[in-house]
Image (cartoon, rainbow, N blue to C red):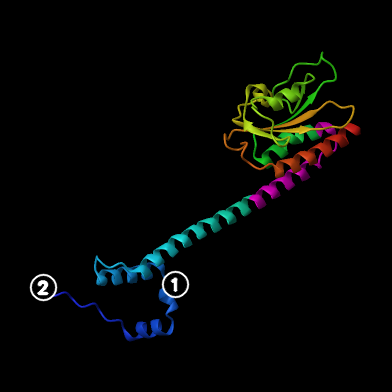
Amino acid sequence: MTETAAPAALDDATRAQLIAEPALILADRDLMRALVAAREAELGANVVDIRGRAMEALEHRLDRLEAAHESVISAAYENQSGMNTIHRAVLSLLEPLDFAGFLDNLDSHVAPILRVETLRLVMETAGDGGPPPQAGGTLVMVPPGAVARMVAAGRRAPRGDDIVLRRAVADTRALHGTEVASEALLPLDLGPGRRPALLLIGSMEPGRFTPAQGTDLLRFFGQAFRLVLLGWLSA
């Protein structure tokens, strides 16, 4: 019969280091797993080592905690990045020196900052005889009541807020002037005596704007945009 070779003994330096710092073993998950497996092999198949099972359960729990920790860090980073983007976009809104420059700036600077394909200011005309919607322009004039119809398009029930995130629908697709997959609608209340308006944002990414996403940053941007727009309308 072939004799089983005895395991090699640890050298004195390694043995002394492990005795002095046993935490080196405890901190190494692969090494601890190998030690538990060796212990269970010595006990045999009919004996269950509860300590080994407890260690496996703790490892699974640690894995879940690490995954949750990484998810929280990722979400915090995305929120910080999104906030910085919105702040840059708001600062860009304040740069133009006239209303024409304000409209041009939406396409040339603000839309790229937000990483979207289209940014349209939709305003209703005062009377029923206004021009038809113009595709492709930054400022789009629509008949009275059109803003409410655009916001309601495709909605089965009222939302709890005034911002709509959804896949692009037929009611607004032509106003973007280019192909988009998802869109955000930010209604703008311009005050007494003025018709309602809408900030229409379009993206080629289907998942960029979805109903499940938060609207806090978009709400802040919409409020800032409304104040800047009111400044130009009152000038």
Which residue of the protein is positioned furthest toward the left in this rendering? Answer: 1
In percent of the image, x 82 and y 31: which residue is there? 100
> Residue 70, relative to residue 131: is it above or below?
below
Q: Residues within 10 Å of mark 2 (few under 14, many from 20)?
A: few
Q: Residue furthest right?
A: 235
Specify which label sits upstream in the sequence, 2 or 1: 2
Tell whether 72 sits left or right of 127.
left
Q: CA distance from mark 2 to mark 1?
A: 37 Å
Is the residue 42 above or below the residue 233 in the image?
A: below
Magenta-drawn segment: 79-101
Q: Quadrant of the C terminus?
A: top right
Front residue of this view, candidates 46 and 179 = 46
Give whichever of 233, 148 is nearer the camera: 148
Rendered image quadrant of residue 59: bottom left
Instruction: Please determine whether, in this image, residue 85 is positioned above or below residue 163.
Output: below
Q: Amino acid at mark 1?
A: Ala
Residue nearest the observer in this picture, 160 or 15 = 160
User: What residue sits 70% from the left and 25% below the top?
Assistant: 150
Q: Quadrant of the N terminus?
A: bottom left
| Residue marked by disc 1 | 27
Residue 118 visible: no
* Quadrant assignment, res 145: top right
Residue 110 % position (x, y): 72, 39
Q: Which residue is mark 2?
A: 2
The quadrant in which residue 72 appears is bottom right
